[in-house]
Image (cartoon, rainbow, N blue to C red):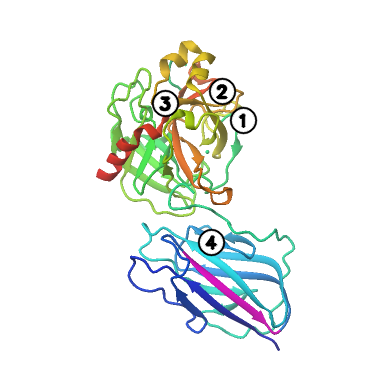
Amino acid sequence: MWFVNVFILILVIIQKIAGDIISPCPKYFLFEPNKSKDDRWYGIIFLNSSRDIKGIKLDLEFDTSIIQLGNWLGEVTSNSENQKFIIRSDKEIQASEVYKVEIYVVYDPYHDSEPPRLIKIKLNDKEICPLYEDVINAQNYPINDFYRPILEVNISIPKCGVPIPTPVALITKGQHTVPGQFPWHAAIYIKEGNRADYKCGGTLISLQHVVTAAHCTVSQNFQHPRDPNEFEVILGKYNLTSDEDHQQLFTVIKVNVHDKFDTTFLFNDIAILQLNKQTQYTKFVRPICLWKEDTSLEFVIDKVGIAVGWGRNDQGHSTTELLMQVNMPIIATEECINSYHEIYSQYTNENNFCAGYGNGSSVCNGDSGGGLIFPKNDRSVTNTVWQLKGIVSNTVGIQNICDPTKYVIFTDVSKFLSWITNITRTT
């Protein structure tokens, strides 16, 4: 008979939140405020065995959803709510060897009333916490498909952000996304009678606000703003044609259209929808960060962002079934104007910009209002924080269908930060 002794030292931040985190295993847990930051706590798991172990499978469960689980042991998977995690490794632990597993937990201190607690641990399918028992007859757990140990795992979503004469609102020749990859992307519908038709995309920027294009919020002829009761917003959506368990449905109580929105040339094409209730942040619903870097266009020329949407695709369908993404570089306004002077010279100004390759990969009808996002420069590839730079506004159209070989004009979000802040703080 043999057994595994487990000792877990979890370093938990002591911050403005009242009360300490209660360990589910007081005999094996010690909490200290070392290393922790405002939005994360760190932990160390010490494993030792009286018998060799080949392959480790650690099941960790928390009392609430978390944003991210990081570790230095191996590959991580989680359930849809990001509450239960499995860490797998082909690590071999020799008899009497003490092996240290370091982890950290990222959460949202502005949304969570208190830090999430680790409430259950299993080692190779044997529960060792909270009801710690000597592990008898535990099996070796070979992990044949193990990749190298990694630090950033599963999802990497920080507090926020972590892709024509007449306006036509496709991700053409784009790539499929995966559920939860762009958790800030919103589907905006217009209600008519007992039905609701998909209209535009949008981007979640706070607990209760979605930013979109102003032209998505006005009547068909651009003559007047739509009533808030006409809108329906769905967050966490991936498949446009079916309902999903993790999606969240909202009505709109206020439509904030920029007071200088020009319905002729679509200048200042930006609006904010105030939802009827606060969103619940999950793996599938998270806000994007607003642009916090240099606001000059020269700063982002030739940088490649990501736009996502369900708009018309290169097969000619009015919408795609699954959310698509496409890479789009920002280009100089002069280059944009020279590519089609008759159009772009009229529709560009200091508050918008052009983007695209002009090769058929683009956004189009149905993608209006969606965001063009970029990773923050001060973050590593493995810890990417995404921020919103542009909103799909308009492009060149042929018979009211976009031409994907032409550049797309985006509203420059960075030029409206004061206006956005004022709206979201006062509503």
Predominant secondary structure in magenta?
A: strand
Vertical order, 19 against 284 (above or below): below
Q: Is residue 248 above or below residue 302?
A: below
Instruction: Give the residue at mark 1.
Output: 173
Separation of disc 4 and disc 1 at Cα? 34 Å
What is the spatial separation of the Cα atoms under label 3 and label 1, in whole angstroms?
24 Å
* Label pair 2/4, CB-CB below 8 angstroms: no
Q: Tag 4: residue type?
A: Leu
- Mark 2 is surrounded, within 10 Å at the Cα level, by few (under 14), some (14 to 19) or many (20 or more) other residues, namely many
Give the mark nearest the N terminus, 2 or 3: 3
Q: Nearer the viewer, residue 113 or 281?
A: 113
Inspect this view and state whether residue 366 appears. Answer: no
Residue named by callout 3:
352
Residue 69 badge = 4
How far across and down, in percent of the image, does residue 144 sit? 75, 63
Instruction: Give the left or right position of residue 416, taking residue 324 as reference.
Output: left
| Residue 405 image position (x, y, % from top left) | 58, 21
Which of 18 and 282 lies nearest the eye of the viewer? Answer: 18
Marks 2/1 in contact by CB < 8 Å: the verdict is yes
Q: Which residue is mark 2?
A: 404
How far apart in space, not on screen, are marks 2 and 3 (Cα)?
19 Å
Q: Which segment did they paint magenta?
A: 41-50
